[in-house]
Every structure is written in C-alpha cells, then in structure tokens.
Image (spheres, rainbow, N blue to C red):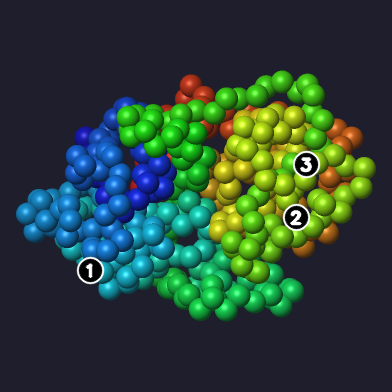
Amino acid sequence: MRTITLIYDGTFNTYRWLKAMMWARNEFHDLGYKIKYASIFDYVPYPKSTKVPYEGIKLKWDTIGRFDIVFLAFHHSQSLIGQNSEKRIALVKSLKQKCKLLCWLDTADSTGTCLFDVLPYVDLYFKKQLLKDTNLYTNEFYCARLYSDYYHQKLGLTDESLASIHYHTALKEYLHKLRVSWNVAFYDRMGGKTWIYKHPFKFADPNVIESDSERTIDVHYGGSNPKVYGDVVGYQRKKMLELIMNLRDITHPDVYKKISREEYLEELKHSKSIASPFGWGECCLRDFEAFYNRAILLKPSMEHCVTYPDLYKPFETYIPINWDFSDFENIIKEVQIGKYDYVAINGQQNYQKYRIGINARKLFAEHVVDQLQIS
C-alpha cells in the first residue's frame, strides 16, 4: 500500500478543489493508495500562508520523518509559497529529500501562469488544464495565457499590469514531467462553508435538470464584470456581452442586470444554451451549470488543451466558438432552431458519468494513479 500525503496552502478555494482526493479515498485504497493530509488540522482549512511560510506554522520538516508520495498544492497568487520563488524552491528541495515521489499541483485556473521554477526539483508537475502541445511551454505568452497572447497579437490589446507579471517558462528537458490533474468540475461549489467543514469526504452535488420543457431563453450569459479581468484576459467576456446584446429576434436575459442567485438558477433551467467564455482560465463553473441544467454549452474552442474529466468534445458535448467570434451569431441562430439539442443531452450524460455517476470516484482515482506513472 502506497501513501499520498496532501500538503496545501490552507486557503478555502484550494481545499474545495483538493478534497476530490478525499472524496475518492476508498477507490484509491482499492488501487493500493492511502490518501491523507499532512496534518489533522488540514481537514478544515484556515488562512495560514499569507503572512508567513506555511512550513513554519504546521510542520517541522526536520522532525516529521519521511513521506512516500507528496502532493503540494499552493496557489500562485493566494499563498506566500506561490508568490515567492525562493521560499517555494526551498520548500520543494527540503521535501524532495524526504519523499519518494514529489508532485506539484498547479492550482491556477488557466493552462498558463505556471510555476515552472520548481520543475528541476519535483518529479511530476500537474496542471488542471494542460496545453496539448507541451512544447509551447518553452515560450512566454502575453499575460501568461495562450488566449491573451492571441488577442494581443491579433487585436493589439494590452494590459500593462498583468503583462508585468512574468512566469517561468519550461526547459524542454523537463516537459516529460507534465501531467493533467483535474478541473473545477471537482470543486465543492454547491455546499456552503459550514456544510463543507462538516463534510470533508464528499461534495454537495447539484440538482440535475433532465426536463426539456419551457426552454424559453435561447441563450443565457450571466458572467462577472469583464473589467475584473482587464482588457486582454477579459476580452472574451466583454465581446460576448456586446454580441448578445446586439442579437435580434433572439431571447436572452439582460446581461447587465443584477439578479439574485435564486433568479439566476431559475433562468438557467429555462435556457436552451449557456455561453461561457474564458476568464482567468479556460474552464469556468458556468460550464458545469450548463451540463447539469441540460443546456447547450457554447464556449470558445478548447481544442488547444487537455483536461480531466474530458467534458469538452466539440459538437458532441459542447459547441466550440472561434476565438475571433466570427461564427457566434450563426451558431446562436442554429441553437434557436434546435440544431444542437442533442449536444445538451450528451453534455449532461457525459458530466454525470464523471462527476456524479456510480463509477465517478473510480474513474477519478484511476485517472490520478495513471498520471502518477513515470515513463
């Protein structure tokens, strides 16, 4: 029996994503892996890494003994280890001497914003979404994302603030260490804080809407304010707002109107399609709202990346949109006449298989174990 020890930054967001490992702990056990946190206190998250190094608070690395497999999850912008390269490298160097397999779990939302300075010192580097062409990681992208670089090159968009933040590129000799972890389909969003604290081993699952009646809204978009993301990273959201508001003979809610969470969820139940542009990363929680509401997911093409679970099968589980939005209006018209109704059903069934199906935990555990293999 092997043991995977989870060490994370203590933030609530990282905890809600990392708890998928505990959710499938029995299935990991069946595969010969025991899952545990490094400390009993890690079963309940609390802010601990914003002011002082994490390792100085909860663990004395010189006395804790040896590990088997270690998963390290520190957010690049919400933890001191994530923000400070010197402390980050010191941490992985220290742990590398005390474990058989050291894995860095990149918690960033995008295929970019990578902390590749740790690559020489870890055995494996996991991303939620990984570029299909890993050779691209040897290049630097504008605002650290492939899609922001696309809009910078094509439209001349700039963002001095985000562009000033430089992330390490990868040396070709380390690309073989890259692996796919899991996206935010496995993220306990539905449960409140109190519920999540009380249930460290399971998710609050969404209500799956299987009825196709009363789909009175042709396209729904309820994204956050594009200004939050800046002119480049937020371009898709700004453009989609403009396009939807200019549509004629198409039913959609007022994309600028603020409504309650209850009203928002009710609108989703009556939507034929849900538009979900990229934000800080490619995968968005809105994607999964489309799936469990049996709406057609309309999303900029995901063909550049791989992720788990594989929910993004073009014209099968979602409808890809060109990054320049040249096909957007035509796709909406095709949605209106029912051309892609089958995609809503396929998308929901595929989501259920990997997220809430009877074998979902088993499939998740098998994926992670498979990614641990070193060729």
Between discs 3 and 2, the one toward the N terminus: 2
In-front residue for pair 21/272: 272
Mark 3 residue type = Pro
Disc 1 crowd, CA 10 A, few/some/many (<14, 14-19, 20+): some
Q: Residue at x 40, y 66 (%)?
A: 115
Compared to residue 294, the image places residue 167 above or below, namely below
Residue tagged 2: 240
Residue tagged 1: 90
In-front residue for pair 278/225: 225
Q: Residue at x 34, y 29 (%)?
A: 199
In-front residue for pair 286/326: 286
The x and y percentages for residue 245 are 82, 52
Q: CA distance from mark 2 to mark 1?
A: 43 Å
How many discs mark residues in the rendered view? 3
The x and y percentages for residue 131 are 55, 59
Q: Secondary structure at mark 2?
A: helix
Is residue 275 visible in the rendered structure shown here? no
Mark 2 residue type = Met
Compared to residue 181, the image places residue 207 above or below, namely above
Q: Secondary structure at mark 1?
A: helix
Q: Residue at x 64, y 69 (%)?
A: 232
